[in-house]
Amino acid sequence: MDITLSVIKADVGGYVGHSSSHPDVIQKAKESLERAKEQGLLIDYYVTACGDDLQLIMTHQQGEDSEQIHKLAWDTFVGCTDVAKRLKLHGAGQDLLSDAFSGTIKGLGPGVAEMQFTERTAETIVIFMADKTASGAWNLPLYKIFADPFNTIGLVIASNMHSGFTFEVHDVLKSKKITFNAPEETYDLLIFLGSPSRYALKAVYHKESGEIAASSSTQRLALIAGRYVGKDDPVCIVRSQGKFPAVGEILEPFASPNIVKGWMRGSHHGPLIPVSFREARAIRFDGPPRAIAAGFQLANGKLIGAADLFDDPSFDLARQQALAMADFLRRMGPFEPHRLPLEEMEYTTMPEVSKKLASRFQNI
C-alpha cells in the first residue's frame, strides 16, 4: 500500500508568550483534520504541539506536494489563527507570511516534511519536532543515525544496512541541492553538514534500494520573510527497523546534547534538549531549544500511537548535561558564542543599529 506521510507545522500563536500552544488552537486543528478524514482526503491524522508550534501529522494517498493536502494544512492554520486572535495569543499567525494560498504551502512560512513509500509489513516511524531552533538542527543527529557506526551498530553488523545511505543536502541560501554517499563520501558530506546555518540535510535514502529513510523541513523563515519573524522550528520523519536503523539507534544521538542556534529571539546558541511531550514548553529565556520524538506504527495508513519516546529516564543525564550547557552559555549574555555571530543577526535589529550609527564610524 502506497502511503504519503506529511508533517506540516506552523506557529499560529503562543500561550503564554512563545512558550506553549493553547488547547483551543489544538482542538480547532483536530476538528479541521477530522472533517478532511470524513471526506476521504486523509486516511488518518495526529495533532500535537511542540512549544508554540502546531504540528499536523497526516497520512493520505495524494502524494508529496499535493495541492489538496497543502491547502488543507493552510486552511487549518488560518482557522487556528482566528482562534489565536480571538484569545489574543502572542504572535497570532506569525508563520503565515502570505494572505492567500498559492498551490503549495512551501514558501509561505510553515515547515514541511513529507515522504511517499510502500508500507511494509511492520512500518515503524519516528517523528521529531523541535522548538526554538532552526532548520539544520537535524544535521548532526541524522548524520549519527545513518553514517556513524559508533551510534548505529547496524551499519556494521546488519547486512541490509552495510552498504550505507545517500544524503540529500540543501544549500538554503542559494536554493541548490547535492547528494553524497556514505561511507565513501563521508568527509565531503561533513564539510557541508558542519555548517547547518547554510546547509540543511533534507532527506536520506537507502543506497541499494533507493527507498526514502528520512525527510526533514529545511524552510528558513527569515529568508522567506526578509526579516526575523520567529525561528524555523523544524520537523523530521525517520523510518525505522528492517533495512533502516532501529528505534534505539535513531534516538541515541540525543543522549549527547548538541548545540544549535535559536533560543531567545532566535539569536542565541543553546543545547537541544530531548524532552517528553509534557515538557515541550519553552520557558527559560524562551527556551532552551528542545525536541520531542513521537513514535508510530502504520497499519494501512492508520497512525498507531503516538508513543512518547523521550519520556524515558535513560535520557535524564542528557537533560542534566544540556541544562549545565545552558547555564554556561547564559553567563555570556550578549557576547558570542552565546549570541549568534553578526552575519547571523542580519534579520534582527542589528541592521537598524548599524545604519543609525554609520555616520559615526571613522577611518583608522
Image: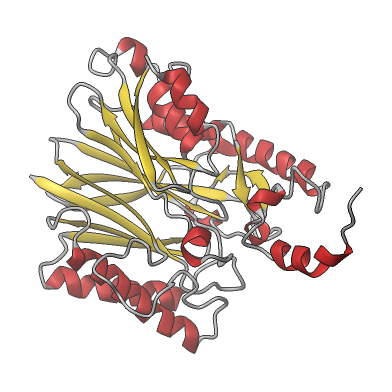
Q: Quadrant of residue 154?
A: top left
State the image coordinates of residue 179 (x, y, percent, origin top left). 33, 30
Residue 277 visible in the displayed image: yes
Quarter occupied by residue 188: top left
Tell me how the rendering is colored.
secondary structure
Q: Is residue 55 visible?
A: no
Residue plotted at (29% across, 41% down): 125
Which residue is rendered at x = 36% and y = 78% of the image?
A: 78
Give the left or right position of residue 205, taking residue 87 as reference. left
**Farthest bottom residue in view:** 86
What residue appears at the point 49 percent right and 25 percent down from the top-left corner? 190
The location of residue 202, given as percent across then percent down, is 37, 42
Can you say which quadrant of the picture contains the N terminus? top left
Left/right placement of residue 350 relative to residue 21 reads right
Q: Give the quarter of the image for residue 66.
A: bottom left
Q: Nearer the viewer, residue 198 or 120?
A: 198
Seen at 13% across and 58% down, the residue is 62
